[in-house]
Amino acid sequence: MGETANSLLFSVEEWRRQGRRDDFGSNIPTEIETVEEKKKRKCDASGSKMELNKNQENVDSRVLGFQRRYHVTDPFIKRLGLEAELQFLPHSEDRILITGAADSKVHVHDLTVKETIHMFADHTNRVKRIATAPMWPNTFWSAAEDGIIRQYDLRESGKRSEVMIDLTEYCGQLVEAKCLAINPQDNNYLAVGANGPFVRLYDIRMIHSHRKSVNQNTSASVHTFCERQKTIPDGAVQYYVAGHLPVKLPDYSNRLRVLVATYVTFSPDGTELLVNMGGEQVYLFDLTFKQRPYTFLLPKKSHSSGEVQNGKTSTNGVSNGIHLPSNKFRLSESKIISNLQVDLPPYLEKIKQQANDAFARQQWTQAIQLYSRGIKDASKNAMLYGNRAAAYMKRKWDGDHYDALRDCVKAISLNPGHLKAHFRLARCLFELKYVAEALECLDDFKGKFPEQAHSSACDALDKDIKAALFSKSDNSDDKKSGSSIRFRTIGRKDSVSDDEVILRERSFDYKHRYCGHCNTTTDIKEANFFGSKGQYILSGSDDGSFFIWEKETTNLVRILQGDESIVNCLQPHPSYCFLATSGIDPVVRLWNPRPESEDINGRVVEDMEGAAQANQRRMNADPLEVMLLNMGYRITGLNSGGTDGSDDEDGTEGHVQCRPKKRVGPDPELRPTRSVMAEVVSADANMKQFNSGFERMDVERSRFPYCIVWTPIPVLSWLFPFIGHMGICTSTGVIQDFAGPYFVSEDNMAFGKPTKYWKLDVDKVYASGPNAWDTAVHEASEEYKHRMHNLCCDNCHSHVAMALNLMRYDNSTSWNMVKLCFLSLLYSKYVR
């Protein structure tokens, strides 16, 4: 990371002096204009060249002058490649530059004399972000991984900072501050992101006033904000969180999936807060029209002062660890008058029909985007909300069930008689693990729609809910999940205070969610507003692309390849239609629109839906797989695009399923992949063939009938030779292997061609014959298309073991990963 600056900025004042502000409205960058400059290259008189669009020639000289004078790699900054964050101090004529770095120090540089004029070493861990405020030109703030937000005032003679916010007092010693931002319209508000799903918004005035009064009352003369009394007064902070995330934390922790706010920023008008949530999605919070999380909608009538949670009564206003909305309603007692369903205008009717057609084709993302377009212009139409909820429930990406729940609530508020929305609401509650609430919601549905009480769908959901309730009744883990216990942790160092629990319970929910990118590898990945009015949302991604969404519809409008590895930083120019991006490459790229008459840029990602699906799989991948992917190894099912066969046939939904479907009986004759169908059956002279009865092994084409095949996993197999990747072959020799989350590869083995094979005896299959073998392999593969991949528990070996158990190979149903690992090591032969 030392070769590239982890932060980008534009000099606001330098560009404003141009006396010009371009309104770029709906323009989306389609062409790259790059600045490719290696680290430690001196900025001499010639400077490095910026390639700008020919239509921008009139500003070339000023752009080059800006780049030569203020490039961050100038020799006066000698921080050993540790630069992590930099900001110009407001009203300093772009003369004062503030930097923070991994050496835990904050430096203040004077660019005119090329000297460091201040150095602060108060932090004890890496400095992640710097924030400035135009209203206070001599003041700035820093956030570091020691959990401290510090304030600096350059007017004071001392070289020590003051503690503005100490997160460790609320969240324990393991909390890390990752990002912060000042509201551009009201500089009194400071947003802070840390590890965990919660984002905090502080009122600086209230904190200052409170501590000033405390200091006066105690006659304290210590120059610090840090008092052992209550350091943050009541009402000085407000928490924001995506409503479903606190409940998902235990599941994410079990899968080694970390949630951390990697970047926060305010909208240009200061009314919205954008958060890039590492390990999840990008969220937009409305700071004006706030809403509580939708988590519990049906309080029992006998519990007027409390809430029912997991079948028990709670009096603290919390269900499953999330604050209940004060405007909750009972579906059976709703007093909302149903609006008459008016016909949509012809153009919206056409959009709705297109969405319905996409839904019928199982193109869930396209259907969601079309319904969202319709909702933007017809926000009072209950049918559009209900249909979009169904599409969310089918797609099943992270957070989709919660968005579906929100749509169901909206549809019911617009039309209390919306039958499908009522039923889908119960299903969403069940999928979100609110089992007791789902049962009560379903009971309410039966009471309101008695003719549907005994339908097959209703009976099936009722059985699922009651089975889940029964399985949870004696589970000690669920006893810990009651009330606000989800907001606490057991460890002493990361224990959460009572004040923190209360603040988390009062959190507000998000307004919009933006999906498609992946943010799991780095903790500095940015998201930003783009456009003259902030009408677009940008975010970097682990796949080397950056994503552009329409803010109001949340629809993905463009993906551009910005880096060979990861795009971390995206900063729009404050006046012109320029965008700067950087990542792992030692390159900073500038983007601006190109004329429509020019050729399409090769950096545009055409298959946006395929890229988004691949990123969803990547976010749910095993950490080892992500590490190998970042090292450059190809892993089937985690790479975007359809050229490698990763999105064949059932790829639209099967790769991202979170809950198994009912198993459908397999076709005895398995369909080969397209690559197999295209191959010529005639034997080649150079082909190595081995006879085994009537079946033939074909090494060149990777055909190993009735075999278990094995290939090494880079790094892991080098350290532990008995560990590798395993697959099982059909009677025709086609390899099927559990290659990643919700994905079974066919004829395209992950980690390369097999290096070892273990030939099995088809006569030892219980029912005997190729059909029984293929049926078992097919059923195991279909099952594992709906399973999460786990390196230690449910992996490629488990997939093969299930196939052997289904066929009762060697009259045994006790095959498992350990047994397979040992026997494969004993009986397998090297491919020659």
Image (tube, rainbow, N blue to C red):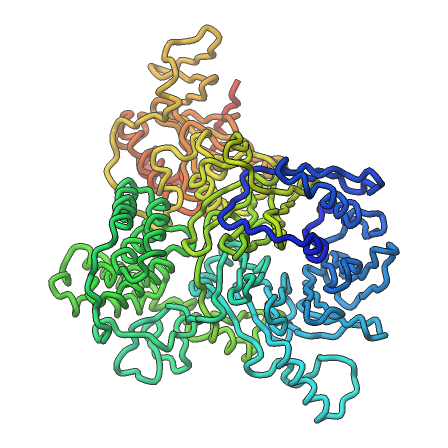
Q: Is residue 490 left or right of residue 298?
A: right
Q: Nearer the viewer, residue 612 or 654?
A: 612
Q: Is residue 645 visible?
A: yes
Q: Residue furthest left?
A: 451
Up the image or down, 780 lies above or below 457; here it is: above
Question: At 45% from the left edge and 40% from the top edge, which residue is drawn?
Answer: 608
Up the image or down, 718 lies above or below 689; here it is: below
Q: Is residue 822 visible?
A: no
x and y, in percent, of residue 674 in the image? 37, 24
Q: Is residue 323 left or right of residue 456?
A: right
x and y, in percent, of residue 574 in the image? 62, 55
Question: At 39% from the left edge and 25% from the top edge, which residue is drawn?
Answer: 734
The answer to which image quadrant residue 203 occupies is bottom right
Q: Is residue 9 left or right of residue 238?
A: right
Up the image or down, 547 lies above or below 822; here it is: below
Q: Nearer the viewer, residue 199 or 248?
A: 199
Question: At 44% from the left edge and 8% from the top edge, which residue is drawn?
Answer: 684
Question: What is the tally of numbered marks visible in this picture?
Answer: 0
x and y, in percent, of residue 118 in the image? 84, 64
x and y, in percent, of residue 785 in the image? 37, 41
